[in-house]
Structures are given as structure tokens and as C-alpha cells.
Image (tube, rainbow, N blue to C red):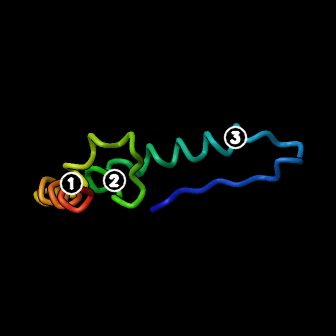
């Protein structure tokens, strides 16, 4: 699941209430989420989650990417 909040940047509302809603919803749903998160949403900074996201295939995927990048 991807949680997206949007608002009119020229409107009277500031984005704080929308960002808080995203944060609160994310916290509520976290216990139901897959460990490691959805792999397509991982960023370069999420390398510690790769093992959980890819399971036993993580090292195989890393080796394959290393082999094809040279």
C-alpha cells in the first residue's frame, strides 16, 4: 500500500495536517505490513531492509546485480 496525501499548495491549509495523517495511518498499518516493506518502494537508504524484503533471495540478487554491473 502506498499512502499519498495531497493538498492545494496555494490554499489556506498548510501541509502539516496531511503529513500527520500519513504518519498516523502508516503507524496504524505497520503491524500488518510485510517485513522489510514493498521492494519497489525501497530507496538507496533502505539497504538494511533488503534482507527482509527479498528473504533468502537477497544475497542471490545482490550477487547477480554485481555480476551484471561489471
Q: Nearer the viewer, mark 1 or mark 2?
A: 1
Task: Kindly report the distance in space between the C-alpha atoms of the residues bearing marks 3 and 2.
Answer: 24 Å
Label 2's element? loop
Dividing the image into 4 quarters, which one contains the N terminus? bottom left
Comes first in the chain, label 3 or label 2: 3
**Which comes sooner in the sequence, label 3 or label 1?**
3
Q: Which mark is residue 66?
A: 1
User: Badge 3, how many Cα within 10 Å: few under 14, some, many 20+?
Assistant: few
In-front residue for pair 54/44: 44
- Residue 11 lies, in percent from the top left, at 88, 47
Query: In the visual, does 7 lie left or right of 26?
Result: right
Dot 1 falls on a residue whose secondary structure is: helix
Left/right of residue 61 with respect to residue 18 in the rendered view: left
Task: Locate the C terminus by quadrant.
Answer: bottom left
Q: How crowded is the residue under tag 1: few (<14 C-alpha within 10 Å), some, or many (20+)?
A: few
On the image, the x and y values in percent for residue 36 come to 28, 50
Is the C-beta separation of discs 3 and 2 under 8 Å? no
Say which of 59 and 51 sits in front: 59
Q: Are marks 3 and 1 in contact (CB under 8 Å)?
A: no
Residue position marked by numbered label 3 in the rendering: 17
How far apart in space, not on screen, are marks 3 and 1 (Cα)? Answer: 43 Å
Q: Residues within 10 Å of mark 2 (few under 14, many from 20)?
A: some
Residue 40: where, in percent of width, then height? Answer: 39, 61
Q: Nearer the viewer, mark 3 or mark 2?
A: 2
Kindly report the distance in space between the C-alpha atoms of the residues bearing marks 1 and 2. 23 Å
- Which residue is tagged 2? 37
Query: Dot 3 lies on which element?
Result: helix
Horizontally, residue 6 falls left or right of residue 49, namely right
Front of the two marks 3 and 1: 1
The number of numbered discs placed on residues in the rendered structure image is 3
Q: Is residue 62 above or below residue 45?
A: below
Amino acid at each position: 500500500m502506498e499512502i499519498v496525501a495531497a493538498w492545494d499548495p496555494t490554499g489556506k491549509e498548510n501541509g502539516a495536517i496531511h503529513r500527520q495523517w500519513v504518519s498516523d495511518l502508516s503507524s496504524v498499518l505497520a503491524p500488518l505490513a510485510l517485513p522489510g516493506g514493498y521492494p519497489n518502494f525501497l530507496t538507496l537508504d533502505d539497504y538494511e531492509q533488503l534482507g527482509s524484503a527479498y528473504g533468502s533471495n537477497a544475497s542471490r540478487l545482490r550477487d547477480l546485480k554485481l555480476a551484471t554491473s561489471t
